[in-house]
């Protein structure tokens, strides 16, 4: 899926566009917590100002978006759709990143996350019968899928760009950053009861949309009282009694992981695909400027805040992937002018003319926007 799509679709729809999923986790109150009182503005400042760049922890993820478990749908990868390799190569038999994103939005997952500064990161996604590893170690980026014993290796010069290309696991800190960047007068901020998350005392920041036409009821971010690091994020749908989407650390340490954590050698017999050396996301040469311009066409936005609808032009959404289109056909329903994919938090209209409209709004608002 192209980068324009990833950057513009509301976070609750694509926290893992290239291969990770989303999540509801019961948060454990390990003990009574009584922290010094802070205002919502102070908790927001605490979270925005955290400087954590080393950690190891476990993230538990699941979702209740009203979608079927795509790992059980034929053609979705049997025991589960893989996250797809790092950019530049896709071993035979691997699922596409787009179908992986959809599958991971409907299937529980556990991930181990390791971080040591800007140039070392490791994510281990543990499926029932397989494991996927994404490893950044200096200039080396690896993706390993144990299900088919495949490895993709890339050499990268720009670590920040490399991390944007990883199959994102929507960790609570990533989700919190997405949501907190969107705080504006259309959102009411309050502080909930103190919590204990992963054994750490946390403030509870609650974001409530000031909007009538939105599917989002409230977003809760649990902020570590000592470091300001977001430990959990939960999204409730309007009128829902249980979270529709959340992610939470179940254990976490802010100590630097051992250096060997980021070492990787392809297992014996693995199929290894080498990708060309890359220096971040460079603009293509002049021979492909027309294609570049189309792939990076800016979407248009109708409305504002929580009631906004994002419209992507024809060609911005992948339509040449039979697996992807087949899954969308099974998940969507025909409506006047296209196909509608509905979830508890986000609706997506695939218009017959190739446009894609997305919003955390009722379906009739999407259709009205398409007709404007």
Image: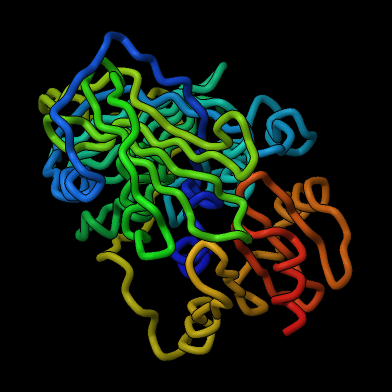
Instruction: Look at the picture and state if 320 lies above or below 154.
Output: below
Quadrant into which the N terminus falls: bottom right
Q: Where in the figure is residue 3, as x and y percent of width and height?
A: 46, 66
On the image, which quarter does residue 256 sit in? top left
Residue at left 31%, top 38%? 191
Pick whichever, 143 or 360, lies toward us.
360
Image quadrant assignment for residue 110:
top left
| Nearer to the camera, 168 or 33 | 33
Residue 138 in sight here: no
Q: Residue at x 54, y 44 (%)?
A: 91
| Left or right, residue 372 beside residue 14 | right
Quadrant in which the C terminus appears? bottom right
Q: Where 210 sits versus 265, above or below?
A: below
Residue 333, above or below 124: below
Looking at the picture, how far across and down is residue 98, in whole percent? 60, 51
Residue plotted at (40% across, 36% down): 233
């Amino acid at each position: 899926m192209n980068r324009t799509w990833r950057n513009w679709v509301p976070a609750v729809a694509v926290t893992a566009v290239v291969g990770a999923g989303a999540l509801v986790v019961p948060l454990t109150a390990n003990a009574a917590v009584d922290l010094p009182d802070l205002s919502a503005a102070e908790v927001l400042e605490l979270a925005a100002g955290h400087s954590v760049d080393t950690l190891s922890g476990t993230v538990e993820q699941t979702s209740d978006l009203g979608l079927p478990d795509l790992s059980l749908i034929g053609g979705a990868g049997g025991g589960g759709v893989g996250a797809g390799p790092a950019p530049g190569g896709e071993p035979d038999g691997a699922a596409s990143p787009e179908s992986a994103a959809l599958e991971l939005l409907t299937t529980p997952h556990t991930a181990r996350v390791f971080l040591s500064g800007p140039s070392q990161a490791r994510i281990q996604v543990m499926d029932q019968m397989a494991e996927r590893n994404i490893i950044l170690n200096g200039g080396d980026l690896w993706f390993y899928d144990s299900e088919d014993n495949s490895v993709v290796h890339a050499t990268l010069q720009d670590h920040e760009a490399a991390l944007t290309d990883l199959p994102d696991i929507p960790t609570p800190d990533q989700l919190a950053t997405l949501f907190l960047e969107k705080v504006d007068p259309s959102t009411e901020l309050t502080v909930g009861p103190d919590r204990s998350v992963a054994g750490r005392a946390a403030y509870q920041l609650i974001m409530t949309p000031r909007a009538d036409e939105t599917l989002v009821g409230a977003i809760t971010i649990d902020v570590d009282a000592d470091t300001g690091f977001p430990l959990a994020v939960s999204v409730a749908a309007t009128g829902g009694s249980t979270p529709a989407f959340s992610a939470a650390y179940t254990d976490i340490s802010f100590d630097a992981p051992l250096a060997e954590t980021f070492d990787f050698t392809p297992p014996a017999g693995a199929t290894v695909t080498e990708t060309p050396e890359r220096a971040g996301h460079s603009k293509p040469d002049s021979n492909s400027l027309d294609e570049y311009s189309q792939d990076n066409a800016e979407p248009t936005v109708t409305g504002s805040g929580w009631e906004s609808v994002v419209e992507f032009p024809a060609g911005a959404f992948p339509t040449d992937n039979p697996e992807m289109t087949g899954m969308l056909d099974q998940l969507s329903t025909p409506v006047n002018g296209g196909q509608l994919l509905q979830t508890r938090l986000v609706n997506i209209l695939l218009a017959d003319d190739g446009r894609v409209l997305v919003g955390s709004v009722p379906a009739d608002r999407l259709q009205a926007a398409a007709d404007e």
